[in-house]
Amino acid sequence: MEFKVNNKTGSPINYGNEVQSLCGFAKDRLGFQEHPNIFLNHDKRNASNTLGKTGHYDPNTMEIHVFATGRHPKDILRSIAHELVHHWQNENGELDHSGYMGKGYAQKNPKLRQSELEANDPMLFRDWEDSLKEKENTIYNERRNRKMSLKEWKNKEIGGLLTSKWGFKMNLGNLSEAKEEEGPSPEEEEEDSEEGEGAGDDDGEENSEEGEGGGELSAAQKKLPAGLQKAIKARKGKK
Ligand SMILES: [Zn+2]
């Protein structure tokens, strides 16, 4: 059975399949029974507030409300994953709304703090994302493929225009501009750094290139809290 998604954003959503997939994944993994209703809400004012609301779960109506205006689809999906955990907690009678519910409840109400801790565990979302990319790798790499072919197309197109204008075929590879393409174009660089970011999530190994010599900490690392400094030193010692 599909999950009901109420799109209130005023524009079509192009990540509907991912919403269904994520909800199905969470249902299988967590094991909730009822399907919560998902609302994608539009709120311009909230969108312009840096620390504005991202979403909430109503245990009485079993509704998940996510503020979708101005957000990246992946960020919206991450919010849905968070609220799905609250739904699961609610079904199990673990979303205790009897205690303090006011400002700072995550700091002042130990039970709700625990609920937030569970909902903020990133691995439900990450595991879903990775499983989907594994299954449908080609779709999620489409952007890169399209970009590569766009570049080829551009070269061909310019070559064709020059040919028709000057009546001879020009070898674009001989132009100095083409040399730049040996290195990454700004477009590609941007994308590479995106991927680097993703890989960086996995482990901190990239940092190990700096100051490898015998557990010495860099100036920036020396500004970290003592506990972190100790952990960094301990890891360097292992190498
Ligand atoms: Zn929460």
Image: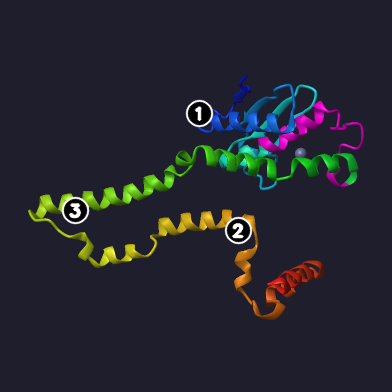
**From mark 2 to mark 1, how far is it between C-alphas?**
33 Å
* Mark earlier in primary sequence (2, 3): 3
| Residue 4 location, quadrant | top right
- Color theme of the render: rainbow
**From mark 1 to mark 3, how far is it between C-alphas?**
38 Å
At label 3, which amino acid type do we have?
Gly
Q: Is residue 12 left or right of residue 216?
A: left
The spot of residue 201 in percent (x, y) is: 63, 55
The spot of residue 62 in percent (x, y) is: 75, 24
Establish if 72 lies above or below 209. Answer: above
Quadrant where ligand 1 appears: top right
Q: Residue at x 79, y 68 (%)?
A: 225
Q: Which residue lies under the disc numbered 3?
A: 159
Q: Which residue lies under the disc numbered 2?
A: 200
The spot of residue 53 in percent (x, y) is: 70, 40
Q: Is residue 115 magenta?
A: no
- Which portion, as a residue range, is magenta? 80-107
Q: Which residue lies under the disc numbered 1?
A: 12
**From mark 2 to mark 3, how far is it between C-alphas?**
40 Å
